[in-house]
Image (tube, rainbow, N blue to C red):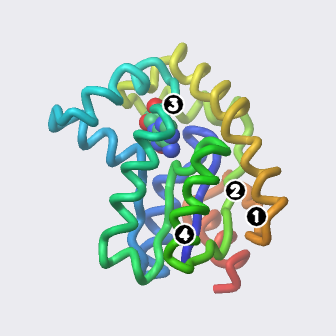
Amino acid sequence: MRLIIMGPPGAGKGTQGALLSEALDVPRYSTGDILREALGEGTPLGREARKYMDAGELVPDDVILGVVGEAMEKPESAMGFLLDGFPRTVVQAEGLSDLLEKRGLKLDAVIDLVVDDEEIIKRLTARGRDDDVLGTIRRRLEVYRAQTVPLLAWYAGTDVPVLTVRGVGSVAEIQGRILDQLGR
Ligand code: AMP
């Protein structure tokens, strides 16, 4: 299976994505995790990404598409994959669609995790990652609305199904809803 999991910051993409990747036995590629790892190692990618991440802005599309292109080169990704936190812009979605087309592959579904803003702010202020400070959280939510939400309409114009899943409840309940929608 080839899936995308999207939703605002704090929607539970990481948690649900990790469980889903295990349940479906496909690798999970989280662009946020890859960037944080690069940042921790002080690589050129990490150094470039830092200023955007700290400000709650998106890392430039060409940089991100490079990261995802590399992931797609891994033999393990031939079995399928789950993309977490990517694509985040229409340009990235188009880039992904090109990467897949070149390989004769298609996405099976986009999972859209829905959580309202009040709950998001509550969750993120409790989480305490470096970019989880109120100003940055607000900016990440704004960026999500302005740049990532339009992807839902973009995918609606393709033959990839968009599965809307309510992201509130216990981790197990939400996972159950996702698997249900996937027919698993
Ligand atoms: P995340 O862990 O998915 O919330 O990502 C944390 C930060 O990494 C974001 O606020 C962005 O600065 C950057 N980032 C992660 N994925 C992407 C992406 N697909 N496009 C642009 N920036 C990204």
Mark 4 and mark 2 lie on one chain; the one further toward the N terminus is 4
Going by the numbered disc 4, the residue's amino acid type is Leu
In this orientation, which residue lies closer to the viewer: 24 or 65? 65
90 sits to left or right of 17: right
Q: Viewed as shown, does residue 86 lie left or right of 40? A: right
Question: Residue 176 appears in which quarter of the rendering?
Answer: bottom right
**Lower sequence index among marks 3 and 4:** 3
Ligand 1 contact, mark 4 (Cβ < 8 Å):
no
Q: Position of residue 40 (x, y in %)?
A: 20, 35
- Amino acid on which the number 3 mark rests in the picture: Leu
In the image, taking residue 35 as reference, residue 119 lies left or right, namely: right
Q: Is residue 42 above or below residue 26?
A: above
In the picture of the structure, the residue carrying the numbered disc 3 is 58
Circles 2 and 1, Cβ within 8 Å, touching? The answer is: yes
**Residue at mark 4:** 100
* Image spot of residue 98 (x, y percent): 57, 62
- Residue highlighted by disc 2: 112
Q: CA distance from mark 3 to mark 1?
A: 23 Å
Name the spot of residue 7 as percent of width and height, x first. Answer: 64, 47
Label 3 or label 1, whichever lies nearer to me, is 3
Q: Earlier in the sequence, mark 2 or mark 1?
A: 2
Outermost top residue: 135
Q: Which residue is mark 1?
A: 162
Front residue of this view, candidates 69 and 121: 69
Q: Residues within 10 Å of mark 4 (few under 14, many from 20)?
A: some
Callout 1 crowding tier (Cα within 10 Å): few <14, some 14–19, many ≥20: some
Q: Secondary structure at mark 1?
A: strand
Label 1 is placed on what type of residue?
A: Val
